[in-house]
Image: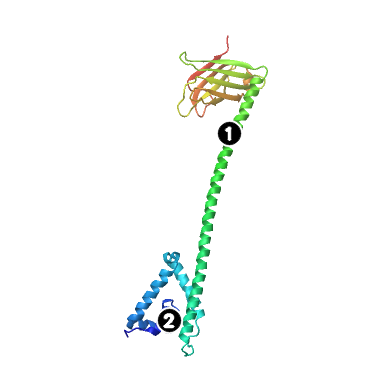
């Protein structure tokens, strides 16, 4: 059969929607093999269905299949039984029911798409806020570290000022070991509390991994590491420390050397500043 099938328009659409029962589907499939008109109509209906679908569905085959299933359910629910009364109005009523079912299904599919689109937007918004939260926490952590560092420096400055105001303060000048060096320093020493503060200037720059160390040598031969410090680009360096109880012995020498970052129990580097008790 190659002529037009004007009476099969409804069946063509039901076939595209896969809404025919098994027997009807098998019969219409056999008919398509012989009917060029119905085959062309089916191909055109499929193109229209996919082109009229929203862009989101055309890009997502799984979503299109889900909507197609919704259309099938809605269409089958809207159609009257196949054996409709043989009246002249039956095809019209059946086509109207089909149109109503398709329209209702499309509305439902649109709502489904909007729901999933809104859900995706909410997830993206949540990810954005999570990234902002992490960034703010990192910024707060950095500011907290800066505050703690400033608090520590302020506390040290207060101890230094308190030391400089103390009674019975002894000032010990240190001279450069090398005659060509401009290095010099003063130690502010408070014997009653064993606190001291050294302020040095003109120290030469050190290589990576090196620090200046302050040593005290007692009359009994003890070597005491007071502490270590670094110098800035101008050669200025300082150190506040509290000496151990063994420093109550008479101090005969005070030396500043340069040492590895992990200072040992005795000096190993070059001497830069020195004080020796007068004979």
Near-viewer residue (200 or 103): 103
Q: Is residue 121 above or below residue 57?
A: above
Exactly how many numbered labels are in the figure? Answer: 2
What x and y, as percent, mark residue 73? Answer: 50, 76
The label number, if any, that marks residue 10 in the structure image: 2
Left or right position of 219 against 272: right
Query: Marks 1 and 2: CB-CB under 8 Å?
Result: no
Left or right position of 34 against 138: left
Q: CA distance from mark 1 to mark 2?
A: 82 Å
| Location of the C terminus (image quadrant) | top right
Q: Quadrant of residue 196?
A: top right
Residue positioned 53% across, 61% down in the render: 118
Task: Answer few, some or many: residues within 10 Å of disc 2's Cα (few below 14, many 20 plus, some between 14 and 19).
Answer: some
Residue positioned 47% across, 86% down in the render: 90
Q: Is residue 141 above or below residue 195?
A: below
Q: Which residue is mark 1?
A: 149
What x and y, as percent, mark residue 121? Answer: 52, 58
Near-viewer residue (7 or 60): 7
Furthest residue to the left?
2
Residue positioned 33% across, 82% down in the render: 35
Near-viewer residue (94 or 242): 94
Residue positioned 54% across, 51% down in the render: 130
């Amino acid at each position: 059969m190659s002529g037009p099938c004007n009476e099969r328009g409804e069946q063509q659409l039901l076939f595209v929607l896969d809404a025919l029962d098994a027997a009807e589907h098998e019969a219409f499939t056999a008919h398509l093999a012989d009917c060029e008109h119905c085959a062309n109509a089916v191909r055109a209906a499929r193109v229209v269905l996919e082109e009229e679908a929203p862009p989101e569905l055309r890009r997502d085959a799984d979503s299109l299949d889900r909507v197609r299933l919704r259309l099938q359910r809605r269409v089958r629910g809207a159609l009257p039984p196949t054996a409709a009364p043989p009246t002249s109005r039956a095809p019209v009523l059946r086509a109207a029911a089909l149109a109503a079912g398709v329209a209702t299904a499309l509305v439902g599919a649109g709502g489904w798409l909007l729901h999933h689109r809104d859900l995706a937007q909410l997830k993206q918004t949540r990810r954005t806020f999570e990234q902002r939260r992490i960034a703010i926490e990192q910024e707060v952590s950095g500011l907290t570290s800066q505050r703690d560092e400033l608090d520590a420096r302020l506390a040290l400055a207060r101890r230094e000022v308190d030391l400089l105001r103390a009674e019975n303060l002894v000032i010990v000048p240190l001279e450069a070991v090398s005659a060509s060096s401009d290095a010099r320093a003063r130690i502010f020493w408070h014997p009653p509390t064993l606190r001291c503060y050294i302020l040095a200037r003109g120290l030469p720059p050190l290589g990576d991994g090196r620090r200046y160390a302050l040593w005290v040598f007692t009359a009994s031969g003890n070597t005491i590491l007071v502490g270590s410090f670094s110098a800035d680009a101008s050669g200025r360096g300082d150190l506040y420390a509290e000496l151990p109880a063994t420093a109550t012995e008479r101090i005969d020498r005070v030396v500043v050397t340069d040492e590895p970052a992990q200072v040992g129990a005795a000096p190993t580097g070059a001497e830069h500043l020195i004080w020796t008790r007068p004979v």
